[in-house]
């Protein structure tokens, strides 16, 4: 297997860490949100109790953790899944790199005069002379992440930080600095160099990201002027850019600006699809299909029917012995997408490994928006799960044409299932459960297992001199010493250790031994780590 293919598969596998958390929390988020919906509360008076609502609010706040910090989770999970040695160091470096990237970006923005105050809609309208539409679009470009004002790079920022963390870790993990700086050598150097590099990346993004945002906004204007084809294009574009997190810009432009519609209702001039719909809902007025065509109604066919069908296709395409694990893995994700319309726990398992499935997924999402719009459905809100279908469709009466989904839903289910099944099997797409290594935690040795004969001899003297691998409980180092915790000091053979020419051997207590190497400590530590890694993986294979 080529290194590129192996790394790409490791990348896809690394995304399962945030995906699993996302899908689990989404269930609680959806249920708590539903039980705090005023329509549901009106039907179940018990839910109006202040204590109940306080508890539900807390659950909703906690369940929203992965959604608000998803970029940071990606920055940490990618190194966790892709790096084979010193995972903790790489994860730490990924997090440090992400924060450094944000700070580099924020500094340049501040130098350019962009802050939370100067990019607010009111400020841009009053001081900049922008229209409400243009001011809202400009404001949507920025956000606060971890208290840092930056361009809203969303998930793509986390992915960049994570991949850079992997690269920099593998490149600098064994770096040996000048003896006077030896404390910062080796693994300690990884987060340092990551911070320095990612500040530069953040500065570069400050100049690149406005181009990306401009392209998305231009696409939004094209969609708004394209009639029914524009509705399809909206659903397609939102889904195709979803893994980057940029879909929030597109959504914002249609929900809150004139691109999503302008209507005068009861003498009120309403701008944006969501604002039009919410006003009509609040005043019990007929819903405008021209506004709802960009809202939840376009997601229901994709989320409630399409995503479960995609999971079924992945399940039936998996190796027979893996199917039980596949089903257990997807249960939370399927539950979440049906209840809340959160698709990432399912989509992120295949769109990063198959461009074909990525594009087909976007095409079907476009059709999911187009079909309800053609038949004049009028279901609003923004999530698109079965809760939205019931609360904003069924409970609002026949004017929403909620019954269309009972007919179109099974058709979409079959369309998704057979198409996904064909693509997965025809093009041998390695979705979850199709590889023997899926659901295993085996370490890959590969090139990292190579060690020179001279280094091997040095490591053998040290390890055997310390009583063998089974006698060692922990290996660490400071600026000059290899610090080792052992089980039985009687097994230590100092004569073997002295063959590596240490500056001295110190025994501070009955379970600790310090071997002094001075400026050579970084190299010695790397030699020992490499040897122990190879030794342990060889023992696993023999076992």
Image: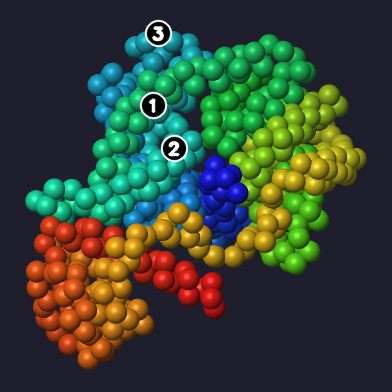
Corner quadrant of residue 48 = bottom right
Circles 1 and 2: CB atoms closer than 8 Å: yes
Residue under label 3: 129
- Mark 3 crowd level (few <14, some 14–19, many ≥20, 10 Å Cα): few
Count of numbered circles on the image = 3
Residue under label 2: 160
**Labelled disc at residue 205:** 1
Q: Relative to residue 325, is residue 33 drawn left or right?
A: left
Judge by depth and name the residue closer to the eye, 101 or 220.
101
Q: Which residue sits at x=53%, y=45%?
A: 3
Secondary structure category for the residue under label 3 = loop
Corner quadrant of residue 383 = top right
Q: Which residue sits at x=53%, y=27%?
A: 249
1 or 3: mark nearer the eye: 1
Query: Could you tell which of marks 2 and 3 lies nearer the N-terminus?
Result: 3
Pinpoint residue 460: horizontal percent, then vertical percent: 30, 73
421, above or below 442, in the image: above
Q: Furthest residue to the top?
A: 129
Query: Could you tell which of marks 1 and 2 lies nearer the N-terminus?
Result: 2
């Amino acid at each position: 297997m080529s290194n590129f293919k192996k790394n790409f598969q490791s990348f896809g596998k690394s995304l399962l860490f945030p995906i699993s958390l996302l899908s689990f929390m989404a269930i609680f988020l959806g249920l708590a949100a539903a039980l705090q919906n005023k329509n549901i509360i009106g039907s179940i008076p018990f839910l109006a109790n202040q204590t109940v609502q306080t508890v539900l609010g807390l659950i909703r706040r906690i369940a929203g953790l992965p959604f608000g910090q998803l970029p940071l989770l990606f920055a940490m999970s990618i190194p966790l899944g892709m790096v084979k040695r010193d995972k903790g160091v790489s994860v730490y470096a990924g997090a440090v790199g992400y924060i450094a990237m944000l700070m580099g970006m924020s500094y340049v923005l501040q130098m350019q005069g962009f802050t939370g105050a100067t990019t607010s809609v009111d400020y841009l309208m009053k001081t900049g002379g922008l229209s409400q539409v243009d001011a809202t679009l400009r404001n949507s470009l920025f956000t606060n992440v971890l208290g840092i004002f930056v361009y809203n790079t969303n998930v793509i920022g986390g992915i960049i930080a994570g991949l850079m963390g992997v690269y920099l870790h593998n490149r600098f993990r064994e770096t040996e600095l000048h003896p006077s700086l030896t404390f910062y050598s080796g693994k300690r150097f990884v987060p340092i160099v990551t911070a320095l590099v990612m500040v530069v990346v953040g500065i570069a993004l400050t100049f690149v990201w406005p181009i990306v945002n401009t392209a998305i906004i231009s696409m939004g204007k094209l969609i708004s002027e394209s009639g029914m084809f524009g509705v399809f294009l909206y659903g397609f574009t939102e889904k195709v850019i979803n893994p980057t997190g940029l879909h929030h810009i597109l959504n914002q432009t249609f929900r809150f600006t004139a691109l999503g519609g302008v209507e005068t209702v009861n003498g009120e001039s309403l701008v944006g699809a969501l604002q039009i719909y919410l006003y009509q809902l609040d005043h019990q007025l007929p819903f405008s299909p021209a506004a709802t065509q960009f809202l939840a109604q376009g997601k229901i066919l994709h989320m409630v029917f399409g995503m479960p069908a995609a999971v079924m296709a992945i399940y039936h395409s998996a190796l027979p012995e893996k199917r039980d694990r596949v089903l257990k893995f997807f249960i939370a994700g399927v539950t979440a997408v049906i209840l809340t319309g959160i698709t990432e726990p399912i989509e992120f398992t295949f769109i990063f490994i198959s461009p074909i499935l990525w594009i087909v997924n976007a095409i079907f999402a476009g059709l999911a928006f187009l079909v309800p719009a053609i038949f004049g459905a009028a279901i609003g809100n923004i999530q698109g799960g079965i809760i939205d279908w019931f609360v904003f469709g069924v409970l609002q009466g026949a004017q929403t044409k909620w019954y269309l989904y009972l007919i179109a839903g099974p058709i979409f289910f079959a369309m998704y299932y057979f198409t996904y099944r064909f693509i997965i099997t025809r093009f041998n797409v390695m979705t979850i459960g199709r590889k023997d290594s899926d659901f295993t935690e085996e370490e890959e040795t590969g090139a990292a297992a190579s060690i020179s004969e001279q280094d091997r001899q040095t490591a053998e003297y040290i390890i055997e001199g310390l009583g063998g691998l089974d006698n060692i409980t922990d290996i660490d180092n400071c600026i000059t010493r290899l610090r080792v915790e052992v089980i039985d000091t009687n097994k230590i053979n100092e004569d073997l250790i002295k063959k590596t020419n240490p500056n001295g051997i110190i025994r501070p207590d009955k379970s600790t031994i310090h071997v002094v190497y001075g400026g050579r400590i970084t190299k010695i530590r790397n030699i020992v780590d490499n040897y122990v890694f190879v030794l342990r993986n060889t023992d696993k294979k023999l076992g």
